[in-house]
Image: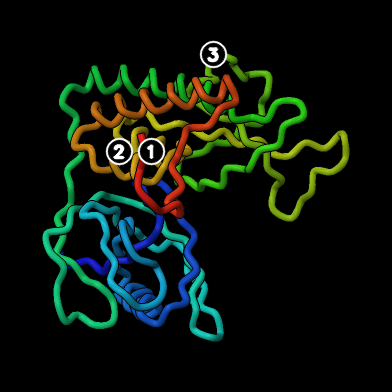
Amino acid sequence: MELPLFPLNTVLCPGIALPLHVFEDRYRALVRDCLATASPFGVVLIREGREVGKGAISFTGTGTIAEIRDADRRDDGRFDLLVVGTRRFGIRHVLDGRGPYLVADVEILDETVDDPATAQALATRATRHFVTYLELLRPRSGETSEEIDVRIEVETEDDDDDENDDGDEEAASEDVEEAAPGEHASAANERPRRRRVLIPDDPTVLSHLLTGILQIELPRRQALLELASTEDRLRALLALIDREIFLLRRRLRAFTPDSRVAGPRRS
């Protein structure tokens, strides 16, 4: 199938929502064409080059199809979009002479589960470890931390009866408080409506969701996206989550070389 490409300095994963501000002429044309035909486009990670301006760029051969959920066109022609990743694709080759933006011949990548029982067991472990990871991300007394701004497209349900809450469900769901539309929960005796975010049961869906949420380097996220089987992705996720837990418990950070520092490497 033919798919317009939108190279970005980010990795979009299936199930993850991504806000985009589109201002370049070529990508405005891409968005206009996609909206006119109700078609998606593909997001790929830039390896070298820049998102904006002229000049050659190189990008990954595996990306994620992005469906437009919401589009707001400004008076000057720019767009504010909200897109959601759906399925992975691999680029066969980039097509020539297709207009101002890139278009590629792509194939949809299958989601492989070699052993459902193993995948489910790995998903259960990954969920429990991820809950520990989220707890450790919360700032301790005297600490400050940056808010994780990740949007996901998962099922939610109302949870109005707090007496029915069961602590054993902690590893399978996350409570989120929000005010109902048009209301403000400012008084002490007023409580916002509670929503329970349901962590998906499907191991493949879960693997992509955790890949998109875990705060890791872009090359690692891209490597997770490219893994062929759900089991391999969950195993790799468990190793990364455990690495993050180790660092967070000691309030350490993983070492990342500064790409701005040039010169020979010394050892």
User: What residue type is disc 2 on?
Assistant: Leu
From the top left corner, tell me how far across and down residue 130 is, in percent.
47, 25
Rendered-image quadrant of the C terminus? top left
The answer to which image quadrant residue 9 occupies is bottom left
Q: Dot 1: within a 10 Å radius of its alpha carbon, few (fewer than 14), some, or many (20 or more) residues? A: many
Of pointers 2 and 3, the one earlier in the residue sequence? 3
Of pointers 1 and 3, the one earlier in the residue sequence? 3
The answer to whether one can see residue 221 in this image is no
Colouring style: rainbow
Cα distance in 3D space between marks 2 and 1: 7 Å
On the image, numbered disc 3 is attached to which residue?
A: 168
User: What residue type is disc 1 on?
Assistant: Thr
User: What residue type is disc 3 on?
Assistant: Asp
Badge number at residue 224 = 2
Q: Is label 1 or label 3 in front?
A: 1
Check disc 1 and report its element: helix, strand or loop.
helix
Give the mark count: 3
On the image, numbered disc 1 is attached to which residue?
A: 211
Check disc 2 and report its element: helix, strand or loop.
helix
From the top left corner, tell me how far across and down residue 54 is, in percent.
35, 78
